[in-house]
Amino acid sequence: MRDGTPCAGEFGQQLRDLRARSGMSQEALSDAAGVSVRALADMERGRTRGPQHRTVQALAEALGVDEAGAARLEQSAAAGRPRPRTATGPAGSGTLALPRDIQDFTARGDALARLAELVPDAGAGLPAVTVVAGQPGLGKTAFAVHAAHRLAPHFPDGQFALDLHGMDAEPTSPRDALARLLGAVGVADAAIPSGTDDRAGLWRSLAGERRLLLLLDNAAGEFQVEPLLPGTGASLTIVTSRQALAGLESVHRTDLALLRREETVELLSRIIGPDRVGAEAQAARDLADLCGHLPLAVRIAGQRLLSRPHERLGKLVARLATEARRLDGLQAGSLRVRAAFALSYRQLPPRSQTLLRRAALAAGTDFSPETGALLAGLTCDEAATCAEELTDAGLLQSDPTGERYRFHDLLRLYAAEQIDAEDGPEVRDAALDRTALWMLRRATAAALHFDVDHEQTASRSDPDPDPDTAPIGREEARAWLEAERAEWLAALRRAHDTGRHRQVLDAAQAMHWFSDLNQHWEQWVEVFRQSADSARALGSRQEEAVHLNYLAWAYNLCVHDPLAALTAADSALAAARECGDGLQQGWALGYGAGALHRLGRTEEAQQRLRDSARCLASQESPQGRLAELTTLNSLGTLLRQAGRAAEALEIHRRSERICQAGVPGRTIEVVGLYHAVARQQIGNDLAALGRWHEAEEPLRQALAAFDAAQMPAWSEQARLDLGRVLGATGHPEARTTLLAARDALVELRNPRQVEAAEALAALDADGARTA
């Protein structure tokens, strides 16, 4: 002892004496303190230079040492611990203590619990490894540090944190990282082997004898991590990386999601205080949304507000609401969202950089490899490879089932900035034009699968731009049109805005029959508004009449705006009369009648339908026959609703006879759908006449036909009609049928959802009265 200070070697003797006085064996002390028997033996023999403070605390408590005795034991241990050394030489050796924990750490309870479940395996002598990967700003390091502090008591032989500098130009080499780890467990510089493999072997040997917690932060790749992982022993290693590190075998993976909105607000509250958040609760929720629920963005916003205690949350919300200013607003001192993204972007190969920034031009919330390829000027295979690379780097998120990718909102803004910085307006516009042209051609070709006038592929005037990858058959065509809805709609919009009006008309015309299968898509109003405007720009009154009629249909059935529908129908009627097109006059009268009916002008609606029927009866074309069937079915419906069910039944029987006779030039499938409409209306007519049992069969037939054709906007209304009839007859299927119809109509945003809810309530009320 020098100057009253214990020497390093005294700790082992002191520990042996305390254990002997307590009457505890090494095994008993091991169990009580949570320290391995091997570690205890090394301490008592002086092989350990100085155990960690937490280990000494655990030993003192297990031994029942008083406060003064515990202080003496800690002083002895501290004397034997390696002192921090100046970083000299390549090893850069020094202390590897855990970074300071974040006091306002929020959420992640499930992920922390799953990580804690790995501790029993580590206790059983099985080294556990977890990889925390994901996009920039998710709080991977903060999570790992917080988890390490929580789990530290389980690893009394040491907790080490090592930054691998994975985002630097020259990440830490495995050789240098091993030197620092060996120094941390007490190996003198002179005793550290020179070769990487020898260092790794020594590290595994030493780590295998200890209960260690190892935090390897910011890993560049598997090459850095693998040599540092203990092979045996009771250790837990937490690895953080922006890369997926998919090549690491037998590891646990901790997936951190974006915070939920309430968690985001909670984090903000912990940073700036609950009173300030409570005073502007809605602004706090809006701020959470503008930050995209990304922990880094929320922390930056919170730190900014914390440094400005008198600034209102609403002021920052107003600034961030403008996309062009959002990334500028998300910075506080050295913390910047843009900088976090830039670190990852600069690590990418040039081709992947191009895909990332150009993909920000995609129209939808997600994009396919073919869209990325068109925007970036790559092949589809190249784009898919780059997209997977970007997903592994945490810069894109992949769809769980399909080959599609999406951005975080803030990452999309960053990528869009890079377009301006690296590509410029000419390159950007060329990419958008190239993509729009290709998308519009494919959308047109895909939609023609549903057009009865183009049922044979050979008849198409505008073939698919890439026949080898074109959708085959209606199912594939439907899937493509649904998946790429935002993209082809943006292509249509760009074609219109750049004056390519013939392409707009061709695409919209091809969509006509497909739109009828998807009445619940509100964007049909925009499609046909654009096409009617393009027809006007080309000076074609006949095509203008056609597309104004389509627009009237969309206003009537897709967005339920009868006033706008009547205006479009009247304009279509004027254009059709001017060019002498009787077919379009008939359609315009019919669509106008539908709008008038919805406006409650029943007598005017009936008159227009009679005028439409007379106009169309003189048309000899297949299109004229189908239009006449539509008009007759609508007229019969109005008559039934006016209390004239017998007349309605007669008109709908007439429609049925036309369908049964067939329509030359139209397939059995197409005519079958018109027949199904007639059967549905016949069922409703019979129900209105109180002939409930007769009504059931035609309604079931109609429903089956619409279901087979995958026409939910039609089938769910027929399901509602059938449910009402079943309810009137006391059929046991009535309630389940009405319930299914109601839920589907709500999802389709169909106004008849109110009827379904009322019918269901009435059925339940009847059941309660008779119970």
Image (tube, rainbow, N blue to C red):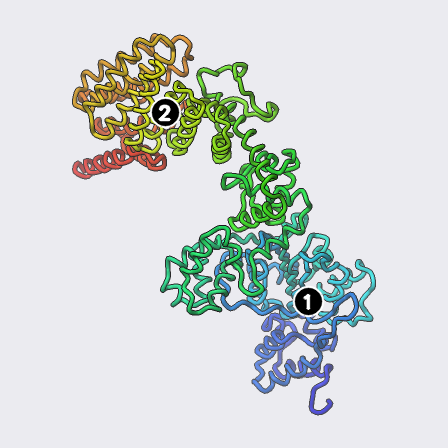
Query: Closer to us: mark 2 or mark 1?
Result: 2
Q: Position of residue 163 (x, y in %)?
A: 67, 62
Q: Position of residue 546 (x, y in %)?
A: 38, 21
Closer to us: 266 or 352:
352
* Residue situated furthest bottom in the rendering: 3
Q: Quadrant of residue 56?
A: bottom right
Q: Is residue 21 left or right of residue 204?
A: left
Three-letter code, disc 1: Arg
- Residue 612's label in the rendered image is none
The residue at which mark 2 appears reads as 548
Q: Residue at x 42, y 60 (%)?
A: 315
Above or below, 151 relative to 515: below
Closer to us: 6 or 714:
714
Q: Residue at x 39, y 18 (%)?
A: 542
Q: Quadrant of residue 582?
A: top left
CB-based contact (under 8 Å), mark 2 and mark 1? no
Label 2 residue SS: helix
Image quarter of the C terminus: top left
The residue at which mark 1 appears reads as 210
Above or below, 409 relative to 493: below
Residue 43 visible somewhere in the drawing: yes
Q: Residue at x 24, y 14 (%)?
A: 651
Closer to us: 319 or 235:
319
Three-letter code, disc 2: Leu
Q: Is residue 256 left or right of residue 705?
A: right
Above or below, 9 relative to 424: below
Label 1 residue SS: loop
Q: Position of residue 653 (x, y in %)?
A: 26, 13
